[in-house]
Image (spheres, rainbow, N blue to C red):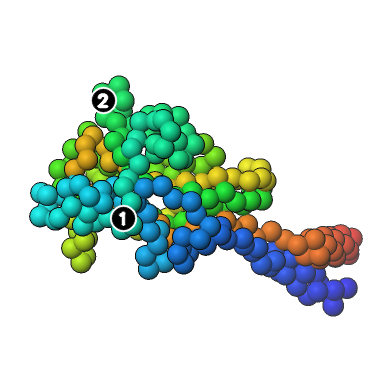
Amino acid sequence: MKQLIPAALTAIALAPCAGPAAAQVGNGNFNGLDGWSTGGDAAATGGHLVLTTSSASQQDDADAGLPAGARNVSGNEPLVAGGGAGSLEDFAGVSAGAFDPDPANFVVAYEGSAASQSFFAAAGSQLAFTWDLSTLDTRHDASLADIAFIVLDGQVITLGSTLSATSPFAGGDYASHTGWTGFTTSFASAGTHTLSFGVADVGDFVDTSALSVSDVGVVIPSVPEPSSLALLAAGLGLLGVQARRRRKA
């Protein structure tokens, strides 16, 4: 029996060692925009999805001394917010005004850009990505704070606003940014899910803001494989037998 104890302990140690299974969202590292549908100003740059509120033709950033379209990344105009065919809400599949931070006080979204994809996820799996919100707006006015958001299966989740973009932006493309931040959420049931990333101008059309996203994927947390569970049960059983024999002795 003494020879069985090390084997039992080995079985217990090996049982939880099944590796994680992972299934990436299609093109979650943004090698181009294949697999993603986009609306407004969207591009894949340096392995990141970039969505902006910048017009391709209008003067958004005159106070920053920039010409019209200087921060536009695609040549496409942002989508008008507020609902109706072709609106930002229509693209993301939500109701009119769903991106308005405080409609009771007339704090509403004016325009924005988004990217969307549908994918299958197993029950218990997790959606994960990193994001960063940059802006040229230095007013720090809550009624004018542009927002970054996701829409997951029709639910709008605000990631942050330009009020949190307090870190200086190296390189001078923007005045400040939030810094890269991780996001995770779990799926309770298996099925096809729809995810949209978006950014919106709030309160006015002034000063470009941009949402950058990277490393989008669906990960299944580690679980013991059936063979490992059998080893675990056998190991615990052997330890139990040995414990009973010692008590009788």
Quadrant into which the N terminus falls: bottom right
Q: Which residue is mark 2?
A: 106
Q: Which residue is mark 1?
A: 75
Disc 1, SS: loop
x%, y% of residue 9? Answer: 75, 70
Q: Earlier in the sequence, mark 2 or mark 1?
A: 1
x%, y% of residue 112? Answer: 33, 43
Please tell me whether residue 106 is drawn above or below residue 217 in the rendered image. Answer: above
Total marks placed: 2
Quadrant into which the C terminus falls: bottom right
Please tell me whether residue 130 is drawn above or below residue 153 in the rendered image. Answer: below
| Residue 233 appearing in the image | yes
Disc 2, SS: loop
Q: Quadrant of residue 238?
A: bottom right
Mark 2: amino acid: Phe
x%, y% of residue 227? Answer: 81, 65
Please tell me whether residue 232 is drawn above or below residue 136 in the rendered image. Answer: below
The residue under the point 34% across, 35% down is: 81
x%, y% of residue 15? Answer: 74, 65
The residue under the point 63% across, 51% down is: 120
Could you tell whether 121 is left or right of 237 in the image? left
Mark 1: amino acid: Gly
Mark 2, mark 1: which one is toward the viewer? 1
218 vs 28, nearest the viewer? 28
Q: Which mark is residue 4?
A: none
Q: Residues within 10 Å of mark 1 (few under 14, many from 20)?
A: some
In whole angstroms, how far apart are the C-alphas of marks 2 and 1? Answer: 30 Å
